[in-house]
Image: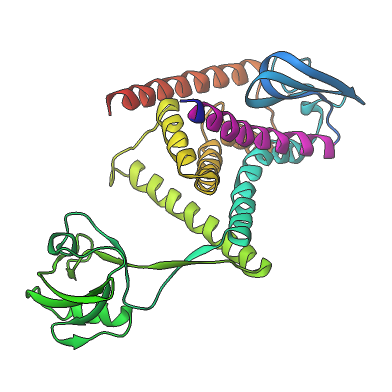
């Protein structure tokens, strides 16, 4: 439990603080007055004023916030160097900057992991890395670490040979000679249909080895990895909206549980999970929904196109609707966490 609590404080503290820092730095760069930049919530632990900004560290380290002058709908419209006094393009930049930081954080995390820890690369030798439970290999007695010597009497020299022989089996029962702890033995296996492709499938994955990447390779690979994950997220979101797949919601309890599980596996898996959460936060926050940055951005986009600014009352009503929507989704997701 303590590990889960500390992991959640670390993960959510970093994610929300980096998001708020994006808003903070762009507000400063565009000449807006930032009255306070806080890490955490609740009573103050430490405060220091530097220039016009009060920097605060608060008791509950689960996030942070910016107090940008003139950003609250109740603030007067003529606040000196306030949010609403700046051009629509400057305001759009400040609104988007938080999510942009959440998109950049995974690139930095993956880059660091690829550079310092390495990346798993498949071993081409016919060595079993993982046996899928319930499939033919598991039923036939194959184990991780076994080396496949022959399939149906034909020698296999690499993993491509394993795939070719299994694909050509036509679901026949095959004698497979493996080498385990220096001794050879013959196992009889009948390939099953791959759930995804329908082709013959034993249920084994190749062994992998960890390879550290150079700075250039690590940078390129981290960008590609982040882009691939983003594409998968948007593809899943599209399938959910179009009804092709069900909605899988995880609320605060579910996310906290997963965070604790990753922390138990080590710091590197926890960082990888943080990268995934950061991308999720960016994707969700950019949705054109009230009270989210995406909704605020589209309001500003409409202002840029029409030249007309939304009134104070309309903005308050939109924000209230957005808060109620987010609260309803959070309650539903939390209920699903407890009923799983």
Residue 63, image x, y percentages = 63, 27
Residue 99, image x, y percentages = 62, 41
Image quadrant where one finds the N terminus? top left
Residue ID at (52%, 26%): 5
Q: Is residue 105 left or right of residue 244?
A: right
Q: Is residue 238 above or below residue 159?
A: above
Residue 61, image x, y percentages = 64, 24
Q: Is residue 174 above or below residue 56?
A: below
* Quarter location, residue 30: top right
Q: Is residue 268 above or below residue 223?
A: above
Q: Which residues are magenta?
A: 4-30
Camera-side residue of 99 and 220: 220
Residue ID at (28%, 75%): 182
Camera-side residue of 106 and 88: 106
Camera-side residue of 101 and 273: 273
Q: Is residue 203 magenta?
A: no
């Amino acid at each position: 439990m303590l590990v889960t609590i500390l992991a959640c404080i670390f993960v959510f503290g970093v994610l929300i603080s980096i998001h708020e820092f994006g808003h903070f730095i762009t507000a400063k760069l565009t000449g807006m007055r930032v009255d306070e930049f806080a890490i955490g919530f609740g009573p103050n632990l430490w405060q220091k004023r530097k220039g016009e900004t009060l920097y605060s560290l608060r008791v509950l380290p689960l996030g942070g916030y910016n107090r940008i002058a003139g950003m609250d709908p109740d603030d007067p419209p003529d606040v000196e160097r306030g949010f609403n006094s700046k051009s629509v393009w400057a305001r759009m930049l400040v609104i988007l900057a938080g999510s942009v930081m959440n998109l950049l954080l995974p690139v930095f995390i993956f880059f660091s992991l690829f550079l310092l820890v390495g990346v798993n690369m498949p071993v081409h030798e016919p060595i079993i890395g993982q046996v899928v439970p319930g499939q033919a290999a598991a039923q036939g007695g194959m184990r991780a670490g076994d080396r496949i010597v022959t399939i149906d009497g034909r020698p296999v020299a690499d993993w491509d040979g394993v795939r070719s022989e299994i694909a050509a089996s036509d679901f026949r029962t095959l004698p497979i000679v493996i080498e385990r702890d220096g001794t050879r033995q013959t196992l009889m296996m009948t390939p099953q249909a791959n759930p995804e492709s329908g082709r013959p499938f034993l249920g084994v994955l190749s062994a992998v080895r960890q390879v550290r990447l150079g700075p250039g390779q690590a940078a390129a690979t981290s960008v590609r990895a982040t882009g691939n994950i983003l594409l998968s997220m948007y593809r899943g979101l599209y399938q959910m909206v179009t009804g092709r797949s069900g909605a899988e919601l995880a609320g605060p309890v579910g996310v906290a549980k997963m965070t604790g599980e990753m922390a138990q596996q080590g710091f590197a898996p926890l960082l990888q999970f943080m990268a995934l959460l950061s991308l999720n936060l960016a994707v969700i926050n950019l949705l054109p929904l009230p009270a989210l940055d995406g909704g605020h951005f589209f309001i500003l986009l409409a202002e840029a196109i029409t030249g007309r600014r939304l009134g104070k009352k309309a903005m308050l009503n939109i924000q209230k609707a957005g808060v109620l929507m987010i609260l309803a989704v959070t309650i539903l997701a939390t209920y699903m966490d407890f009923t799983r």
